[in-house]
Image: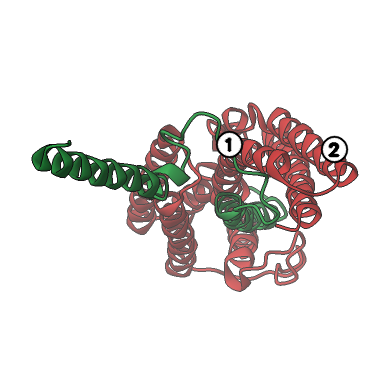
Amino acid sequence: MNVHLVARGLASLVVTAGLGLAGAVAVDADGTPSPSPTSVPTRGTHRVITLGALQARCDAAVHKRLGTLAADDTFVKQSAALTGADQATLEGQISADQSGLTALEQAINGDTTLVQAHADCELIVTGYSVYLLQDPKIHEVIAADGIEKVDATFNTLAPELQTLINNSSVSAAVKAQAQTDLNDLISKVAASHTSISGVTSSVIALTPAGYPGNKVDLTSARSNIKTARSDLSGARGDANKIIKLLGA
Amino acid sequence: MTHPTALRNTILCGLACLAAAACGATSVKDPAAATGAGAPVGVTAAAPSATPDTSAVNQSIGSIDNQLNGIDSQVNAADAGLSATEGDPAQ
C-alpha cells in the first residue's frame, strides 16, 4: 500500500474530526451561538488533532451540555407553571440525557483510535441534540403550560371584574364600556386557549432521532405560544381599562 | 284601690319591657347584621359602592403579571435555542 496515500487519508480524517468538533465547541464557547461559527477552519486548512486533544474537546462539549441540562432541570423542578405530568416527563428525559451523556463521555475517554473517538463524539450531537432540540423543547413546554395556567387565572378574574362592574356606581355609559372590555378580555382568553391547545403534547415527546425533521414542530409550537401570549397581553390590557373605567 | 305589690310589679314589668326593646335596638348594630345575615325584613341591600373592593381582582392580576413574566423568559430561552447550532461532526 502506498504510504503517501495512507498519510493523506489520515490527515483528511484528522481535519474532518477537527472541523466537526470546532463547530460544536464554537456553540459551547460563547453561549450565543451563531449559525455560521467564524472559528471553524476552512477546508483547505490542515489541522492535526491528536486523540487526546479530540477527547478533551469532546469532554468539554459533554460538560457544557450537562451544565445546560442541569440548569434546565432546575427550571423544571422549580416551575410553578408545569403540570405534574409534564414535570415528571421532562425530569425523566433530562435525567436520561444526563446519564447517557455521562456514559458517552466515559466511552470517548476509553476510545483508542481517532475513528472511534470521532464516531462517539458525533453522538454528542446526533444522540442528544441538547441545544437544538431538548433545551428549546423544555422551555416551550414550560411556556405552554404557563399560558394554560394564565388562562385559568383569567377565568377566575373575569367573574371578579363582572362583579365590580355590576356593583359599580359609575354611569351607565361607562359601565357599558367596561362590559365591552370585559367581553373582549373573555374572547382573547378563549383565543389564547385555542392557540395553546395541543402545543405541549406536540413537542414534549420529540426526540433527537427525529431531528431535523421535527424542527418544524418546535417552530410551530413557538409560533402558537407567541400568538397565545399576545392574546393574553390584550386581555391584560382590557383588565387595566376596566379598572380605570370603574375608578377602582 | 291598687294594691302596692301589684303597682310595684307593673313598674318592674314596664322596666323589663324597656330593657328588652333596648336590647333589640342594639342588636341591629351588631356586625353580623351589617353583613346582611339575619337582616330584618324590609331592610334594603346596600347601595353599589363608588369605590368597589378590588383586592381579589388585584390579587388575580398580580398573579397573572408574574406568570406572564415567567412565560416571557421561557419564550426568550426557546428562541435562543431555536436559533442555535451544535456544529456538525459528520461533515
Disc marking residue A63:
none
Q: Nearer the viewer, residue A23 or A76?
A: A76
- Report the amino acid beneath label 2: Thr
Q: Are marks 1 and 2 on the same chain?
A: yes
Residue sitting at x 62%, y 28%: A202
In this structure image, what is the colour of chain A? red
Quadrant housing residue A190: top right
The answer to whether any part of residue A100 appears in the image is: no
Q: Is residue A80 above or below residue A32?
A: above
Mark 1 sits on what residue? A152
The tag earlier along the polypeptide, 1 or 2, is 1
Q: Quadrant of the C terminus of chain A?
A: bottom right
| Badge 1 element | helix
The answer to whether any part of residue A145 appears in the image is: yes
Q: Of the residues tagged 1 and 2, which is closer to the observer?
A: 2
Residue B28 picture location, percent across and down: 41, 45
- Chain in green on the image: B
| Badge 2 element | helix
- Report the amino acid beneath label 1: Ala
